[in-house]
Amino acid sequence: MSDAAPPVLHLTGPILVDETHELSEAWVHDGRIHHERPDLPASTEVRRIDGAVVPGLADLHCHLGIGDGGGGISLAEARAQALTDRDTGVLLIRDAGSIIDNSPLQQQDDLPRLIRCGRHLARTRRYLIGYADEVEPEDLPRAVAREAGRSDGWVKLVGDWIDRPVGDLSPCWDADTFTAAAQAAHDHGARITAHTFAEQTLPLLLDAGFDCLEHATGLTADTIARAADADVPVVTTLVNVDAFETYARQGEKKFPTYSAHMRRLREQRFERTRDALDAGVKLLTGTDAGGVLSHGIIHDELDELATAGLTATEILTAAAWEPRRFLNVPGLEDGAPADLLVVPRDPREDHRALRDLTHVVLRGSVVVG
């Protein structure tokens, strides 16, 4: 096997560093992107790659280690999920709860960068069977502290679910418990996010100081304004929300109020998303892949954002630039790790150009193309 150094990549633009900053060319050398040509020996092999360059896409609500239909899977199967995501252009994942310990995937250089939330935390008998660590309110702060220590600085709480005696969605915890959970996360140096569908849960989460909102289908004009003022982002998961019709049909006979509620949330999903963005809420892309939905569906999520009325540049912001800023992960700034995509057309003109990957570069190595 040859010990020759990999070629330096010469990228010819546009290099889309962020919403307002682009370059005509850049170089990849020693695993990093350089805005100026580095000093290279005359014998260095240089490989030219033409096309528009963007940071790798982000999936901020993904489950590596939960199989199709639920249940834990092997680490090898979780690796296959990550490879599927990578090959669609997802190079940054925030895992929003896994049944298995997927931390060994972080040591595999050919996989997307992974930021872990640890295990879901849910109220006893108020979530999908087997997915979460189920606890009672008095035990929640201790469980949050534990997951903060096990994760990469994030904790995921199930904020609401169907309450069978009520026959509809309702918060799983009261205001004081939400506040105690957020305080426990912050005291242990972590941020906390929550699964939330229902309208009445969102004021409780915002009052408690949660750092992020997952799904957030119950946003209203009031909570949109509050989220914007507090700079609390929403992870979209619109593909998942489209499946609410399935859940409504499944529950229709026993829980007609719940079924009607889920249909209403689905029907307003595009308007809610557009209103949130217009009000200044930061949107972040997430697929909710793992469990019900298969991996590799990031482009379906981008198509849903387009249906909601986002421009191609707004979609790029939600899918590439803003998630990296939110998670403090470098993008394409000078000297950053080279995690990037090359496409033949400018994706600011049509987001669907991101489906036509010619090259995927991860940690400076070409893994696709």
Image: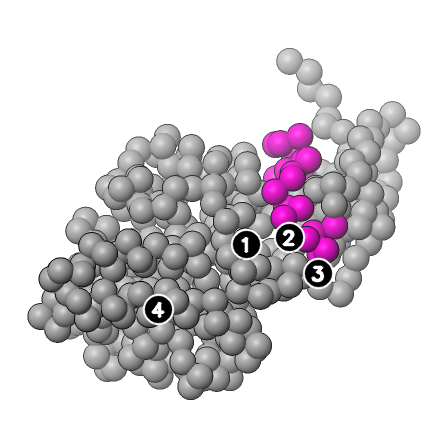
Q: Position of residue 234 (x, y in %)?
A: 46, 68
Q: Which structural element holds mark 4?
A: helix
Q: Nearer the viewer, mark 3 or mark 2?
A: 2
Vertically, is 173 above or below 207?
Answer: above
Mark sitting on residue 18:
3
- Sequence-first disc among 3 and 2: 3
**Residue at the spot of label 1:** 302
Q: Which residue is mark 4?
A: 265
> What's the CA distance linking mark 3 and mark 2?
15 Å
Image quadrant where one finds the C terminus: top right
Which amino acid, mark 1? Leu
**Contact (Cβ within 8 Å) of mark 2 with mark 1:** yes
Mark 1 or mark 4: name the one nearer the start of the chain. 4
State how far apart marks 1 and 4 are (Cα).
19 Å
Q: Are marks 3 and 2 in contact (CB under 8 Å)?
A: no
Within-10-Å neighbours for mark 2: few <14, some 14–19, many 20+: many
Residue farthest toward the left in the current orientation of the protein = 165
